[in-house]
Amino acid sequence: MQFTDQFRDNRLAQALLAEIRRTVTRPWVLMEICGGQTHAIMQYGLDQLLPPEIELVHGPGCPVCVTSLQLIDKALAIAAQPDVLFTSFGDMLRVPGSQGDLFSIRAQGGQVKVVYSPLDAVRIAQENPDKQVVFFAIGFETTAPPNVASVLQAQALGLKNYSLLVSHVRVPPAMHTILGSPHNRVQGFLAAGHVCAVMGYWEYPPIAEQYRVPITVTGFEPIDLLQGILLTVRQLEAGTWEVQNGYKRVVTYEGNRAAQAMIDKVFQPCDRNWRGIGMIPMSGWELRETYADFDAERRFDVGQIQTRESEVCIAGQILQGMKKPAECPAFGSLCTPRNPLGAPMVSSEGACSAYYRYAGAQA
Ligand code: SF4
């Protein structure tokens, strides 16, 4: 495929690996932010091809994984209501809440529909005026523009039966949390290319400067990832901490200003609870007061939600790069994709599912 094959070229990959081997002189720990990058690393076995000095740890960039248990439980409570048609991306249906998941709500008669875009949910709201249609708006900066667009479209159509259950999170505050932790092991970041396609990378230089960590904006193909690793390791070896763009075919410093303006019109920053990690100040987005009518949390009284996490799941430590999936005692035994105990085993971007799928249950 044009634009893809050239970034999977074996000879180029070998040349980059050789250059990485020539460059590295001592151990370094790098974190790829995005779960999509984690899956590509595992799928192509890049972690096995790198010199042993380079350890890759896996970041929190899996939106399904970091959506708080409390919000999942709110989704279950809303979806169970008789006049509600609850819409979501497919990944969220199997994420375990305190008691069941959205699939179990559907099995009990709840109307839960998988959609491929929030604009599909708006269409469903148009077609079902007697139902309250809720879209589960999870994700990082990448999915914010379509979610915001759905609110603007619903407003333009005069829909009174459409709302978002919002769980948006942002990358830069999570990087602060990881780097500021006394347990931090991360010495360099591969920033998520698609997030930067929307937001640019103007937010990252102060982070690189404050913690003295090099950051490389990195794509998702094997050549992108190896190039991101090489650029980051070169900086680590040289003792520099700049932000570099290794994904120039997609990302600019400013990002998509029109998308950023649209997000800013509808969303405002808020504190956000990350599953397994906890509260990170100003790490999320919520609907502005002017769009409160589209806020499902205000529209539905879901009462007091008491959450109960699995006691064995160490997802929080994995998402902060402190542990690897195979170090979880439940990995591949109590916790499998068929019977997930935590979200990273469910999501197509989850690190546990990547290890299970590509490295096997005995990883
Ligand atoms: S293997 Fe399962 S229980 Fe362990 S951290 Fe991953 S999701 Fe949680």
Image: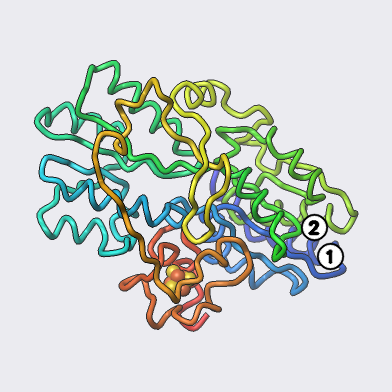
Q: Identify the secondary structure beneath mark 2.
A: helix
Please say if 181 is above or below 357. Answer: above
Neighbourhood count class around disc 2 (C-alpha, 10 Å): few under 14, some 14–19, many 20 upward = many
Residue 170 pos. (x, y %)? 55, 42
Quadrant of res 162? top left
Where ligand 1 lies, by image quadrant? bottom left
Q: Amino acid at mark 2?
A: Val
Residue nearest the viewer, comparing 219 with 101: 101
Q: Is mark 2 within 8 Å of ligand 1?
A: no
Please say if 113 is above or below 153. Answer: below
Residue farthest to the right, as pictured: 238
Q: Amino acid at mark 1?
A: Val
Mark 1 touches mark 2? (CB < 8 Å): yes
Residue drawn at x 56%, y 52% is 34
Residue 172 pos. (x, y %)? 63, 43
Neighbourhood count class around disc 1 (C-alpha, 10 Å): few under 14, some 14–19, many 20 upward = some
